[in-house]
Amino acid sequence: MDSAPVVVVGSGLAAWTVIKEFRKHDSQTPITMVTASSGDAYPKPALSTAFAQNKLPGQLRNGVASELAATLNMQLQTQTRALSLNLAAQTLHTDHGDFGYSRLVLAHGANPIRIPLQGDAADRVLSVNQLEDYQVLRDRLQPGMRVLIMGAGLIGCEFANDLSGAGFKVQVVDPAPRALAALLPEDASAQLQQALSDLGVGWHFNNSVVSLHHHAGALQAVLNNGETVDTDLVLSAIGLRANTGWLNASGLVCDKGVVVNSLLQTSDPHVYALGDVAQYAFAHNRLLPYVMPIMTTARALGATLTGTPTEAVFPVMPVAVKTPAMPLLLALPAPGAAGEWQAADEDVWKFMASAGECLGFVLAGKQTSQRSKALQWLTPS
Ligand SMILES: Cc1cc2nc3c(=O)[nH]c(=O)nc-3n(C[C@H](O)[C@H](O)[C@H](O)COP(=O)(O)OP(=O)(O)OC[C@H]3O[C@@H](n4cnc5c(N)ncnc54)[C@H](O)[C@@H]3O)c2cc1C
């Protein structure tokens, strides 16, 4: 199988970046990209800030697949879905035939989580995880419409800010008691909520949508507590689930994602994974569905696949929350770390362990410019 190409599944940031990294070391080994989408490149983080800037989907595209493929000397197989994997035969089965591989890179991302809703409009719920989804959102939204967002996490709050900034009447519903509850100390949540409320965002905490109905020419959501919310559009932002279903029969070890070691190698020595589909066994078994981990792992994997085994080592990777009403920069403690959030200064919170080590921070507003200084507070783990 050594003469077979390196096959990469997916065409998001993870796939394109690992191919670019590979080509820095090796210009000749055949590479084939197999992707269910058009393959065109775009910056996914821009999807939750694009409406207020009135960006059309085409304006977000930053690479045409065929042009990138020519530059990178690779084959492109678009609109092609991987369906199953035969590890022994080193063959990827797709809806457009079989692809043999010498090495396979799984970079096919995650899917929006869907909670089952009752009601005759349950199928009207949208999610935005791909450029095509953003097109659908733009097609459905007319000026001044009401939008109900399910989820007050990172993506939900970003869309709340973006859509209210674009003139829509936004309400947010979440089973948690406050915004970004899993990530922020209580008073930081309160400040973010206030900043978004000032833009007109309404909140329904400790609550969730149970059913969605067509009602008076629009939609009506019924919440857990019996309350009803009239709206024109429902956007679900309750999280993603790594797309591992089609790998189930292959025998590849999957848990919350495709499990990889620090070489990004799965349980099969010829198969690697990175991006939103990967679960990093060497980093507290976490999924890390963010840009920085992708850049780090793609660099390491590009070297590994071209003959220099290179372990991925994650630096501290702060995440920016793109809520212009109150921008945030978060460096979160490792899962399960003991300690508590303490207000350290105006718009600054530190996560402190009992022995006085700083294990994480939250910067808000103008303090987000203090990134370098804040990184120095952290005690190396
Ligand atoms: C709205 C939004 C805002 C975000 N903002 C930020 C941010 O500010 N900062 C940050 O760090 N991160 C952010 N993220 C997360 C970040 O964008 C993602 O972690 C990253 O883009 C994931 O890239 P990926 O290549 O792993 O997956 P994807 O971009 O999802 O790419 C997966 C690709 O695989 C293809 N595919 C799927 N299944 C198959 C199959 N069976 N066969 C063939 N092809 C398949 C898909 O068509 C797609 O092309 C944001 C995410 C969203 C949704």
Image (cartoon, rainbow, N blue to C red):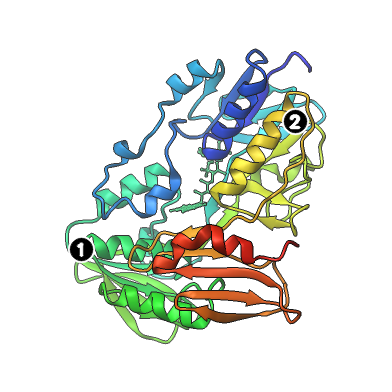
> In this rendering, would 145 be left or right of 286?
left
Label at residue 167: 1
Tell me which residue sits at (82%, 29%) in the image: 88
User: Looking at the rendered structure, which numbered label has been put on residue 264?
Assistant: none
Q: Nearer the viewer, residue 253 or 203?
A: 203
Residue 183 pos. (x, y %): 55, 71
Q: Is residue 192 above or below residue 7?
A: below
Residue 117: x and y, percent? 45, 68
Where on the picture, by quarter, is residue 119? bottom left
Q: Residue furthest left?
A: 143
| Quadrant that contains the C terminus | bottom right
- Rate crowding at label 2 as few (under 14), some (14 to 19) or many (20 or more) other CA atoms within 10 Å: some
Picture quadrant of residue 34 = top right
Residue to which mark 2 is pinned: 304
How far across and how far down the image is residue 175, in percent? 49, 78
Q: Is residue 165 above or below residue 54?
A: below
| Circle nearer the N terminus (1, 2) | 1
Task: Look at label 1 and name its amino acid.
Answer: Gly
Q: Residue at x 38, y 42 (%)?
A: 132
Residue at 78% across, 52% down: 282
How dense is the environment of label 1, judged by Cα within 10 Å: few (below 14), some, or many (20 and up)?
Answer: some
Q: Would you say the beta carbon of the disc 1 residue lies within 8 angstroms of ligand 1?
A: no
**Marks 1/2: CA distance?**
48 Å
Q: Is mark 2 within 8 Å of ligand 1?
A: no
Q: Are marks 1 and 2 in contact (CB under 8 Å)?
A: no
Amino acid on which disc 2 is placed: Thr
Left or right: 75, with 119 as reference point:
right
**Image vertical order of residue 170 relative to residue 74, above or below:** below
Residue 187: x and y, percent? 47, 82
Q: Is residue 84 visible?
A: no
